[in-house]
Image (cartoon, grey):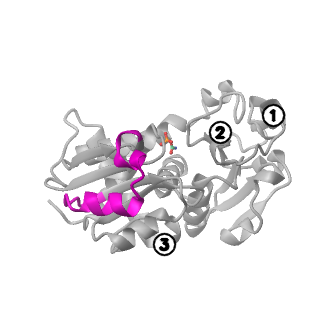
């Protein structure tokens, strides 16, 4: 059995295949706790976790908080609008001040790629990445992999299409890093303005000329959100044009394998990335992704705390 020796979880790029498999199998065990009447175990009793979110979040922040609480850790949430960041305090100063209060883990989301790496070098407590700019979103990558494993029982040999704004997507980057280590083949499609040059070098990745080419015979179709907030200028003519060429609808979904799973990290721009009938259709695994997010984050918190606590 692999051991997990990392103080921090910053990126799936840093983890081995065995470490990713360990996190996924721990998440599978954690799931049972989430289905109990009393959803609480003492595993992280006495640990203090600070959730420091400099960007908005519904799914990630709520599920990291629930994950900590279900493992009996004490949690504190800090958002930029109510923190001293509004008064110009730097991230490093905020971190050192929080550290003086002796947290065991800081879970952070930040708009700047690489900010977690800097933080992790400055603080002795664990740092868990809840999304850094367009770099990585490791907990999302893990929950996506867990959901695919639920459907297929394996990740090896899967054809996974990822469609949309690849350039600005930390979700795409984490999935590419994790899935290629576990033997999946990734097919990317998106407008040329949203496709980073050299992305093929990240792993077992094929860049396709169209959505149709990417999703043909796919086991998994993962649609990405258009990240207007990270696009300095708009990179598409308009939402209707985008939906016409890169939107998933019941008609083009037929190109994928029968019963292919449809995924989206959320939040969804309904009618742009996907039609509502696909979002709510019987091939959609989107809410299962959200459900798995709690178990995956429990596993991450557990392993950065040493993985052998009560
Ligand atoms: N998928 C995801 O990161 O969603 P939130 O922005 O709501 O956390």
Q: Secondary structure at mark 3?
A: helix
For disc 2, the marked residue is 259
Single out the mark in the foreground, 2 or 1: 1
Single out the mark in the foreground, 3 or 1: 1
Image: magenta residue range: 81-105
- Queried on whether the Cβ of the residue with tag 2 lies below 8 angstroms from ligand 1, the answer reads no
For disc 1, the marked residue is 238
Whether pointer 2 and pointer 3 mark residues with C-beta atoms closer than 8 Å, the reply is no
Specify which label sits upstream in the sequence, 2 or 1: 1
What predominant SS class does the magenta segment belong to? helix
Quadrant assignment for the C terminus? bottom left
For disc 3, the marked residue is 14
CA gap, disc 2 and disc 1: 31 Å
Residue under the point 19% across and 61% down:
102
x then y, percent, for residue 35: 29, 37
- Queried on whether the Cβ of the residue with tag 3 lies below 8 angstroms from ligand 1, the answer reads no
CA gap, disc 2 and disc 3: 33 Å
Towards the viewer: 23 or 91:
91
Q: Residues within 10 Å of mark 3 (few under 14, many from 20)?
A: some
Q: Does 92 appear in magenta?
A: yes
């Amino acid at each position: 059995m692999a051991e997990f020796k990392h103080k921090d979880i910053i990126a799936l790029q840093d983890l081995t295949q065995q470490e990713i498999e360990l996190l996924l199998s721990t998440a599978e065990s954690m799931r049972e706790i989430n289905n109990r009447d009393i959803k609480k175990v003492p595993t992280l009793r006495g640990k203090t976790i600070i959730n420091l979110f400099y960007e908005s979040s519904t799914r990630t922040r709520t599920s990291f908080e629930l994950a900590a609480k279900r493992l009996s850790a004490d949690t504190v949430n800090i958002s930029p609008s109510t923190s001293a960041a509004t008064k110009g305090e730097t991230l490093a100063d905020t971190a050192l001040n929080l550290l003086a209060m002796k947290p065991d883990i800081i879970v952070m989301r930040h708009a700047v790629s690489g900010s977690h790496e800097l933080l992790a070098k400055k603080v002795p407590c664990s740092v868990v990445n809840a999304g850094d700019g367009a770099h990585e979103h490791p907990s999302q990558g893990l929950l996506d992999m867990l959901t695919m494993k639920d459907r297929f029982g394996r990740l090896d040999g899967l054809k996974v299409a990822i469609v949309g704004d690849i350039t600005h997507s930390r979700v795409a980057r984490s999935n590419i890093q994790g899935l290629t280590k576990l033997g999946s083949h990734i097919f990317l499609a998106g407008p040329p303005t949203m496709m980073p040059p050299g992305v093929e070098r990240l792993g077992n990745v094929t860049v396709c000329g169209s959505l149709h080419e990417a999703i043909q015979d796919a086991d998994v179709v993962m649609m990405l959100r258009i990240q207007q907030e990270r696009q300095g200028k708009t990179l598409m003519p308009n939402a209707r044009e985008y939906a016409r060429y890169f939107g998933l609808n019941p008609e083009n979904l037929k190109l994928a394998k029968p019963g292919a799973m449809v995924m989206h990290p959320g939040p969804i721009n309904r009618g742009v990335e996907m039609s509502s009938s696909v979002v709510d259709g019987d091939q959609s695994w989107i809410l299962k992704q959200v459900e798995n997010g709690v178990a995956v984050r429990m596993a991450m918190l557990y392993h950065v705390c040493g993985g052998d606590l009560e």
